[in-house]
Amino acid sequence: MLDGSIPPASIYSTWVETVEVWSIDNDTLYDFSGVVDVILRLQDQLSRFDELIITMRGGSITLPAPGIVQWRVEAPAMFALRPKLYKLIMVFQTDTDITSLILGTVSVVE
């Protein structure tokens, strides 16, 4: 479960965001100890095409503390996006499992 909402991002700026992820099992910050990769996807809501994909392995996502996910998308990659509302999907991979969270939507604006 994500705590809060994602504010709009601009195609003209570097997009830096920090979110908290809480466990629905025990209402504590999510334990990332077994996570080997995190993938963040911005998906077109109509075509379901992923228009932006960033990963922890690629260096764009960090896990600085339990339950905290931070990402950074540089301005040139943001400029390649069309301004509109995207579905925001976060995928956590361990050695044995994949867990997907649909974080909701994010508005990418000019």
Image (tube, rainbow, N blue to C red):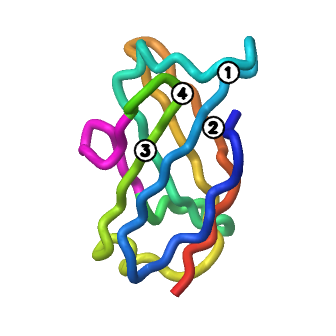
- Mark 1 or mark 4, which has the lower sequence index? 1
The part of the chain drawn in magenta is 53-62
Three-letter amino acid code of the residue under disc 2: Leu
Q: Label 4 belongs to which residue?
A: 67
Distance (Cα) linking label 3 and label 2: 15 Å
Q: Label 3 belongs to which residue?
A: 70
Q: Residue at x 32, y 74 (%)?
A: 75
Distance (Cα) linking label 1 and label 4: 9 Å
Q: Residues within 10 Å of mark 3 (few under 14, many from 20)?
A: some
Q: Label 1 belongs to which residue?
A: 23
Distance (Cα) linking label 1 and label 2: 12 Å
- Mark 1 or mark 2, which has the lower sequence index? 1
Q: Label 2 belongs to which residue?
A: 101
Q: Is residue 22 left or right of residue 91?
A: right
Is 54 covered by the magenta stretch? yes
Is 83 covered by the magenta stretch? no
User: Is residue 59 placed above or below 37 in the rendered structure?
Assistant: below
Is mark 1 in CB contact (under 8 Å) with mark 4? no
